[in-house]
Amino acid sequence: MQDIIGLTRQQIAQLLASDIPDGSIVNLGIGMPTLVGDYLPPGREILLHSENGILGMGPAAAGEQIDPDLINASRQPITLLQGASITEHTISFAMMRGGHLDYAVLGAFQVSEQGDLANWKTDAADAIPAVGGAMDLAVGAKQVLVTMEHRGRDGTPKLLRQCTYPLTGKGVVSRIYTDLAVIDVAPEGLCVHAMKQGVSATFLRSVTDAPLHFPQTPRTIVLDGAGVPRYE
């Protein structure tokens, strides 16, 4: 079976950014999620939160914009929007735990068909546990959106019937954005919302351990001339 070239990390972030509704308060986790802040559509009022104590985070900083004291959760230099606030950790985590975030965008090692999330420790011998605020975000945000590659580097599926790594949160994931598809977690399991152009249901099932459901015809993710993804 022919393999498929999936979306890049940047394209996954672009697609997710286009789905965030106006007026949302959104936390961007470590890794791929931080890219989302660079692709938010202009004209939308979306307030970005970073667990290290920023509310009103802007895009990544470059050149003379860089201030070593202004970084996101991935320790990357960022900008601030007008009206942004900086707090200490107790206030920041109160926002996370108190249900004040509309969305938390998190990376994942594994997601189960029930929406269980594993993103802080693998079973590798040299794995270093690094949970940070992921558990607080997973249970505190109104919805959890996950960005991840559909398969590991060795080709093994990362969407599973049951997670084999330690859980960050149980039944917390709402939607999954991978390099091959956008998948919703529903009561009946994993429901395919959209697939990258060229991906078939047969292929997607072959690279997914958990059963996939197709309650309606999935939308197609296409790339424009500049490589920007959109739904058709």
Image (cartoon, helix red, strand yellow):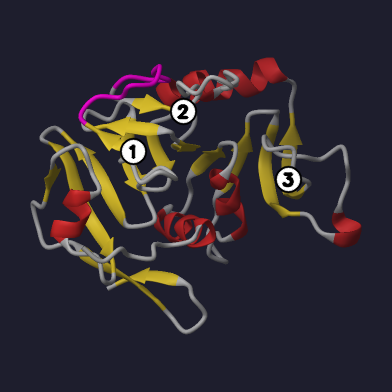
Residue range corresponding to the magenta coloring: 161-170
Asked if 151 appears above or below 136 in the picture, the reply is below
**Left or right: 191 as drawn, with respect to 96:** left
Q: Quadrant of the N terminus?
A: bottom left
Position in image of residue 126 (x %, y %) = 59, 22
Magenta span: chief secondary structure: loop
Kindly report the distance in space between the C-alpha atoms of the residues bearing marks 3 and 2: 32 Å
Position in image of residue 5 (x %, y %) = 38, 65
Sequence-wise first label, 3 or 2 = 3
Q: Amino acid at mark 1?
A: Lys
Q: Which mark is residue 83?
A: 3
Q: Quadrant of the C terminus?
A: bottom left
Q: Neighbour class for label 2 at 10 Å: few (<14), some, many (≥20)?
A: many
Give the farthest residue toward the bottom: 225
Q: Neighbour class for label 3 at 10 Å: few (<14), some, many (≥20)?
A: few
Q: Secondary structure at mark 1?
A: loop
Asked whether disc 1 touches disc 2, contact meaning CB atoms under 8 Å apart, the reply is no
Q: Is residue 123 visible?
A: yes
- Give me the residue at 37% from left, 32% from top: 110
- Give me the residue at 30% from left, 56% from top: 181
Position in image of residue 133 (x %, y %) = 57, 22
The residue where tag 1 is placed is 158
The residue where tag 2 is placed is 119
